Amino acid sequence: MPKLKLSLNLKPALFNTIFQSKLFCASKTRWVIHFLVFAGFTFLVFFHALDELTSFNLFQYYQPTLDPFQFLRNLAGFLVLTGCIGFLFRRLFKTRINRENKTKYKEIFSIILILLVIISGFMLETVKIISEPAFLEMVEDYSDLDEDTDLNALMTYWEKNYHVVFKEMLIITEDTLEKGRLLNDAYCLDCHSKIKSAFVSKTFAMHLGEIANSLNHYRADNWLYPIHYLLSFLMLICLPFSRFFHILMIPFASATHKMTSRHFQKETVSVHPATFAACTNCGICSEVCSVYPNFLITKNKQILPHSKIESAGKMIFSGHLNPEALNQLQLGNDECTMCNNCTDICPSGIDLQGLWKTLPQTLQKMGYPDNYTFVKDKALQERGKKQAGRTYELTRNLAGRVYSFENCVQCTICTNVCPVVAYAGNDNDMTPQQIMNLLRLGEKQMAAETRMVWNCLTCYLCQEHCPSEIKVADIILELRNISNQTAGRLKIMTATNKANKL
Amino acid sequence: MKLAYFPGCKIDFYLKDYDTSFKSLMEKLEVDLVQLPFNCCGYPARSTSFEVSVFSSIRNFALARKYNLDIITPCKCCFGQLKYASYQWRENKGLKQKMDCLLADENLFWDGKTKVKHLLSFLYNDIGVLEIKKKINHKLPEKKIVTQYGCHALRPFTITGFDNPHAPRIFEELINITGFKTVEWSKSTECCGNPIYETNKNLSLKILDSKLKAALESGADHICTACTHCQIQYNDLSFQKQCRKYNITPVLFTHILDAALGESRKNNQAKKGCRNLI
Amino acid sequence: MKNKKHITCDITVIGAGFAGMVAAARASALGLKTVQVGNSSQLYFASGLFDFLGVYPLHSRTVLQDPLTGLSLLQKEMPEHPYSKTSLEAILKSFDFLARFLQSTGLNYIKPDKENRSVLTSAGTFKPTCMIPETISKGCLLKNDTNLLLVDFKGLKGFCAGQIADVLKKNYPNILTLSVGVPGGNGNLNPAYFATMFEDSSFLKEIATQISPFSDKVELMGMPAVCGINKSLDALTRLEKMTGLDIFEIPMMPPSIPGLRLKNAFEKKLAENNVHFLSQAKIKSPQFNGSEFILNAVNQNMETQIKSRGVILATGRFQGSGLHAQRGCIKETVFDLPVYQPDKRSLWHHLDFFEKQGHMINTAGVETDNVFRPVDTDGTVVYENLYAIGSILARNDWIRLKSGSGVSALSAFTAVNDFYKKNAAGDIDVSD
């Protein structure tokens, strides 16, 4: 478990939470879509869902059916709706860097949930607009109309202006309308703004046609209420278990003090606990990743930051990773060049690089150390017995071809100029010239598993000084590639054996 | 002149100073730098996979080729790797084919025409020592400098062609025109130890310490680097402490030349770096 | 397609061994624009001692005390030998130039004496040689009754004071030995790295404290030739001051430090003299267009086209790949020049390995005129401005004659002077 640390850095947290400033820098389209949903939904939550607490207290004459609230509610809903459609469109039609279907479906689920809440809201509003029973109940409650003609006039007016759908045909005349308007002014206007401001629901209501009557008959306005509520609650319940969680975590992640090179030098790197939950797996980090081309060849997903953080989270919090995956994670993380591109761009404000820096420690504890440590810790003989490794066929395969080292006269010049031999002392086992000798003896695998291969600085002094012009450093690097594969297999083997014993 | 600026992975996070002073220097020398979405040069991947390392480089070349630009980098390691990869790409037919296919997937291609220059070789070969000397308007005080050449640019010479691998002169000549005087030391062309800093810190620092000893013997005031990795290595905290004790400072070449070319008006950070030297 | 580059120069030196280095040194000292192609690491195998003529006649198997008598005899008996093409004066001048050149880099050599100097080797034997580094020179003071201290270092392979003393004890009874522990040593020291430690004053002090107890008992001290690389004399003098002893170095097996010092000195000075050095490049398909040589120096990534008026071939013999032994005959590798060689392969080697006259193959090589221009079988010069120098020259069994450095220096010096006289000098005196 990496060292966890809580810290607070308010300014970027606020900026990034409210304006999503980092997402804006990363991708304008994504920002637009995301911000539509974010702004709309936030408004709905605060001024519509929690109106008992907020709106009623803040605004003296607040009524959901009054302008500007009615208009704003529709507008917000409309924004969310557009945003969600944008989201869905991108999810379905835009292929992005190596995303697993699982995460894709997870996201689509979240988006559809939002969509359902919003649509059910709009439907609710629509059926309330057209609802005759609701109209009559309101008349009963809020007016003292006795005469049928009055009621009729009001109904005519509402049918015309508020799109209520009545079972019976009403006869519309100038007089009744005028009368209805007066009655409306007297009883309704305080609580009901003009319906055109509810522009989404109104449009729906106008196009319902024949269904409207049956909806009214079955009191759709009554049963859509619980549906809208249930969906909202479902969303609330899903909050900690789905992609929604990032909403709560991003402020924390953004508030972390990012690790600087100073921290790295002092080796005081820590990871914020919000790191893992704040990740939305958007994949922007992988688009700017310096070692992205490595993925194109090795196809190891664990090179890409967005996959790496997910696996790391799984490894740390639930331990559900098999040896193969852990080894891949170690290999992938090893490729990281610490260029800070991912941290720079992460829209969630996660300090990704800090995580990459701490990961190796955790992996080492689980039996997946970096290869230098691994080779150092293993006895030479033990490794010598193991099968020869598969090499990339496209390398020059210097270590496998006799002509590349047969000219070695063991003059020890390479050993003499080698800084590793000079300064490593007991940290080192073989010297470059001895490695050439191992190759001449046909012990390629043994040569590949010496500490020298991993200690090599790749300074090329040996190669430059070789009187026989043998590509000493190139050969050592090639052996390192071989050793890398063998080490990986051995790590997996050890871990599997251990698990089997348990 | 217009060149694609290849900063390398580490510079942004570890050594922003180098980045800013490099840019300021290039501005004074009227070189336009274009920033392209380059990826890693591929050197770190040489430990794990030959193919990956070559492909990373070739992809960068292809990006630069798309804009018809040559590449300039302040990092010796990146320079060396890009050279190395271009050589392997040319020599190894199968490899070339595979790289070409992968590039085509991303709508890129490379025909081998892009050149890569390191800061020093660019100044020496493309601009010329005399030309720079003309522009120097601030002679620096006579301080003793030892140079750290950086392995990957210098060796293997048969691939990089940087300078005489046994007795290089470029760096010295470029420093001597500023007023600073280079002195000889035995460790000029040896490794700084950075490549194994992450894995075997102990050894890495031992190698670094040997440099300090040699620099002390030569009586130098500064150790000058022109490579991101070397300077990062010299920036190691425990090493810096020792340097202060003996009054030696590792210093970036760009700071020196930038200072010699006169105060920078725009760039505050570069300015600060220059001031420390004057 | 490799990266292409073009260079035009006065003279190209192919080869970066000892002869090539001297030629490049002379050429650059005369102000010729020089390009050098080759692998300088061969100098690691040089002992750092410059032989003139150590043994003559060959079958005598005795060491020549006075090389001059040997030389006059050789010039008489072997008119085709490189030494016979020139005078003693020229030989001395070439040594003199070499000494001055090296001195300017801070590597001091003691100039030749009338007699050969005998230098103690790490095997306990004495080697006759002519010009030696100052750090080794005090070893010549060794007399049979000298109180000598031999020092070796724990962990430094290939040098054992006890062994040397054992070989010497018959003639030199007053020898003490000492094994010095190396501070910070890990039991396995490489000469090159170990030598750099001597340039650190604190290290010298610690060594000196271990040696000082012997200061009163002995007059002279011998140690392996590892005392510093770039400032060897300085380090040795400091050590002498600290211990109060006269100290000399004993050359070791290759890779030798005196050879490394030589390599560094040449490389540094040649670079200062603007000699363009193409390390590890090979010359492919050389052409001559009537006035200029067009050489393609090819290495892994680059192809450098050199246009040069003169070429100096210093590619060495088989080890340096100047000569290539094919099944039936020996070929010269760059220009395919005619090679003087035994008629049949069966004559290359004697059946007796220790044959007194040496093996025929060791006299194979390129034959030249008096200014070391290769000649055809009928004795005509192949190219006006092509010279062959160093061990590639025919009829010089330099290992047995102990004449390697002398022939190399002489031929390099003479060849470059000749080129300069003919092509650039006008009426400038090139004698020094």
Image: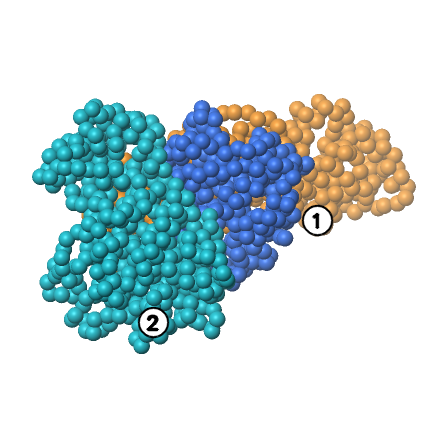
Q: Chain C is drawn in which colour?
A: cyan
Amino acid type at circle 1 is Leu
Residue B18 lies, in percent from the top left, at: 55, 38
Amino acid type at circle 2 is Val
Compared to residue C163, the image places residue B30 above or below, namely below
Residue at the location (25% across, 34% down)? C247
The foreground one among A111 and C271 is: C271
Residue B163 lies, in percent from the top left, at: 46, 51
Residue at the location (46% across, 65% down)? C422
The answer to which image quadrant residue A327 occupies is top left
Q: What element carries label 2?
A: loop
The foreground one among C178 and A150 is: C178
Asked if residue B41 lies left or right of residue C219, the reply is right
In the picture of the structure, the residue carrying the numbered disc 2 is C375
Regarding residue A447, the answer to whether it shows in the image is no
Residue B215 lies, in percent from the top left, at: 43, 33
Asked if residue A211 lies left or right of residue B5, the reply is right
Q: Is mark 1 on a helix, strand or loop?
A: loop
Q: Colour of chain B?
A: blue
Q: How is the image coloured?
A: by chain
The chain under label 1 reads A
Compared to residue B182, the image places residue A270 above or below, namely above
Q: How far apart are marks 1 and 2 (CA)?
A: 110 Å
The answer to which image quadrant residue C79 occupies is bottom left
Asked if residue C206 lies left or right of residue A41, the reply is left
Q: Which residue lies furthest to the bottom in this view?
A: C378
The chain under label 2 reads C
Q: Residues within 10 Å of mark 1 (few under 14, many from 20)?
A: some
Regarding residue A199, the answer to whether it shows in the image is yes
Residue at the location (35% across, 29% down)? C201
> Disc number at residue A208?
1
Q: The orange chain is which one?
A: A
